[in-house]
Image (cartoon, rainbow, N blue to C red):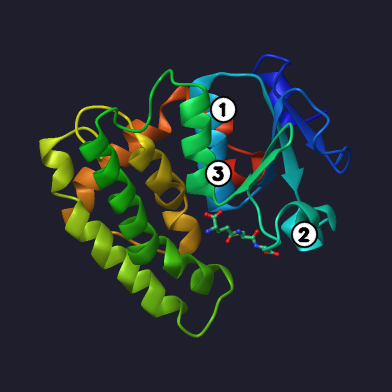
Amino acid sequence: MGHREVNAPSVRRVVRDADYSWGTSAMMNLYSGTTDPFSHRCRIVLYEKQMDFQVIDVDLFNKPEDIAVINPYNRVPVLVDRDLILYEANIINEYIDERFPHPQLMPPDPIMRARARQLLFTMEQELFSHIEAIEKNLKSADKARQHIRERLVELAPLFNKQKHMLGEDFSMLDVAIAPLLWRLDHYGVELPKTAAPIQKYAERIFSRQGFIDALTPSEKVMRR
Ligand SMILES: N[C@@H](CCC(=O)N[C@@H](CS)C(=O)NCC(=O)O)C(=O)O
């Protein structure tokens, strides 16, 4: 039995260690790393939308060969929706957002949507590109921690003015940053008191039902 069955409707199943028969299910299948921040983003979107889908837990320490078949870059997340196969978390999330428009996570206006995509890119460059060094405990890990800390301190005052990244409403930008905010303790990134507004913002995101439902057991224990 997967962990989702306990709290969520039975249509959302987590398949473990089996059933890699991709392309045959009528439901969307997300191949997701249980501790991977990028897969976490896609799980958040699926749970926020409350649609029928299946999450397939992929053990990255014992990666099934099937992942290389569906993603030439051999990484998760991968979304399989009948004969459509997508990889890259932000690309997967925009597809889900367009397929299931409620609640809409990308802004409806083309200019705002373009800005949102630009900010998603900036977030990859300034924050998420540093995660690998920390996860793999490379020599540059401390520099990466410092870089993330500085960027988050810079961002903090924004949340004195607004509730979410793009304004009042929860959006794809909040989805994108949330897995990192959840992992700050786990990654050893300590924020100073001046970053209190971003901590408060993070708690607001963490209390959303979609966010709570999307956490895997391994992610739940990342925060004390
Ligand atoms: N830019 C990609 C990053 C995905 C990624 O880096 N996934 C890692 C886990 S953090 C992975 O699957 N690595 C393969 C491995 O560890 O063997 C995305 O947004 O989906």
Pick the residue in front: 98 or 15.
98
Disc 3 to disc 1, how far (Cα)?
Answer: 11 Å
Point out which mark residue 213 bears: 1
Point out which mark residue 103 bears: none
Disc 2 to disc 3, how far (Cα)?
Answer: 20 Å
Give the mark toward the camera: 2 or 1.
Answer: 2
Look at the numbered disc 2 and give the secondary structure of its residue. helix
- Label 1: how many residues lie within 10 Å, few (<14), some (14-19) or many (20+)? some
Is residue 193 shown to the viewer in this render? no
- Label 2: how many residues lie within 10 Å, few (<14), some (14-19) or many (20+)? few
Q: Disc 2 vs disc 3: Cβ atoms closer than 8 Å?
A: no
In percent of width and height, residue 217 lies at 66, 40
Asked if residue 78 is positioned above or below residue 169 in the image, the reply reads below
Disc 2 to disc 1, how far (Cα)?
Answer: 28 Å
Q: Quadrant of residue 104?
A: top left
Disc on the earlier residue, 2 or 3: 3
- Viewport quadrant of the N terminus: top right
Name the residue tied to disc 2.
68
Kind of residue at disc 3: His
Name the residue tied to disc 3.
40
Disc on the earlier residue, 3 or 1: 3
Residue that sits furthest to the bottom in the current view:
139
Kind of residue at disc 1: Asp
- Ligand 1, seen in the image, is in the quarter at bottom right
Pick the residue in front: 110 or 1.
110
Disc on the earlier residue, 2 or 1: 2
In percent of width and height, residue 136 lies at 59, 73
